[in-house]
Image (cartoon, rainbow, N blue to C red):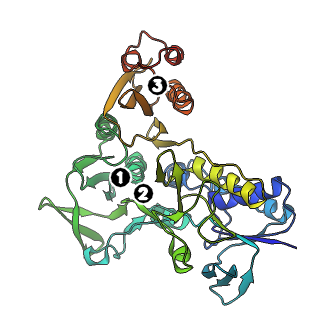
Amino acid sequence: MTHIAIIGAGQAGAALAAKLRALGYDGRLSLFGAEPVAPYQRPPLSKKYMLGEMALDRLFLRPESFYAEQEIDLFTDTRVASLDAKTRRLRLADGREITADRIALTTGADPMRLPGAIGGDLPGVYTMRSLADADAAAHEFHAGRRALIVGGGYVGLEAAAVAAQQGVQVTLVEMAPRILARVACAETATWIKALHAAHGVDIREGCGLDGLNQCGDTLSARLSNGSTLEVDFVICGIGVRPATALAEAAGLTIDNGIAVDVMGRTSAEGIYAAGDCCSFPWKDRRIRLESVPNAIDQAEAVAAAMLGQPHPYVAKPWFWSDQYATKLQIAGLNTGYDRVVTRPGDKPGTQSHWYYRGPELLAVDAMNDPRAYMTGKRLIESGKSPLPKAVADTGVPLKDLALIPAT
């Protein structure tokens, strides 16, 4: 009997295991997860779960009975310590050794943490990546507390929104000149900053954290602008790194993650990768996508490739962020844009920003405007680029934009 081992029981690992069975694989199938729980959704952790709007049982991707019914050996609380790429032998942290015919790495990404030298290991300093992280910080989120959020990316901003909604006094610091500097245009950042200001969040741009000191039950934060801030807890949202340690130690090629081809194959025969941990060819470059849709779609493509039914994986990037009552939906990748076109929505409080490189539409940010998002997504995926002046003209219906190509 053949044996496929999947290392990493997150969104990609769970999707890959389910797809293997759906495609008819009837051999031994093992799914190894370092966390003590079955695979679960991560996005709600910093949103609905922290707000108490989503119960724990709703976080799980599948009921535990699914794994037994599908004869998937789910190993929770089990860390794979090493991998021999030539023999495809796994050594678990408890000393057990397991050999597989094919292996998939779906190890995800690890949160970047504040250095211990500036107080990142003090009590009251949290990251927001895992269920354990969310549970550890949950008791802090109540009225009257004071929070410092470090990092003005989507994770930091979502944590700020949740805290503010719980009555926490929130200060957010971002070292870059503005929030969302790496991922969004100034227009989107300005919109989001105003949204947070309306909810009482104090956003300080061009300002970093130099250090933390314990002062009884509180923390004293020294900011890079010379000021100090007394807070009750700190959330670190400064980004993630692909979890490549296992692959790197095994000698696999690393390039902004585990390097794979369009079939999900790594540099070692019989070993594949999918999800946040890997980079892959896309258009004229290599990218790594941290998103649920990519984790699922790429994992399912890898499942087919592992069973000898390969077809090139073509990513269709899309993302979302929920902050207060605003849903930000993003289609495409804006890398290399040289122009942003703003289109007001049909209702108050709605708007979209369309990114162009020359005449080519690259991406769309839509704030509470799902019709603009879906239109932009369809246009990008079909390779169509409407004239920027048509996008800006609300007299041109969204449905007609596909009929007005760029010239």
- Can residue 202 be seen here? yes
Q: Residue at x 82, y 53 (%)?
A: 23
Picture coordinates of residue 103, whole percent (x, y): 69, 70
SS category of the residue bearing label 3: loop
SS category of the residue bearing label 1: loop
Residue denoted by label 2: 141
SS category of the residue bearing label 2: loop
Q: Name the image quarter holding the N terminus.
A: bottom right
The crowding category of the residue bearing disc 3, from other C-alpha atoms within 10 Å (few below 14, some 14 to 19, many at least 20), is: many
279 or 78: nearer the viewer: 279
* Quadrant in the rendering for residue 349: top left
Residue denoted by label 1: 168
Q: Residue at x 50, y 52 (%)?
A: 289
The amino acid pointed to by label 1 is: Val
Residue denoted by label 3: 385
Picture coordinates of residue 340, whole percent (x, y): 33, 30
Does 148 appear above or below 402? below
Closest to the camera, between mark 2 and mark 3, is 3
Q: On the picture, is 83 further left or further right than 228?
A: right
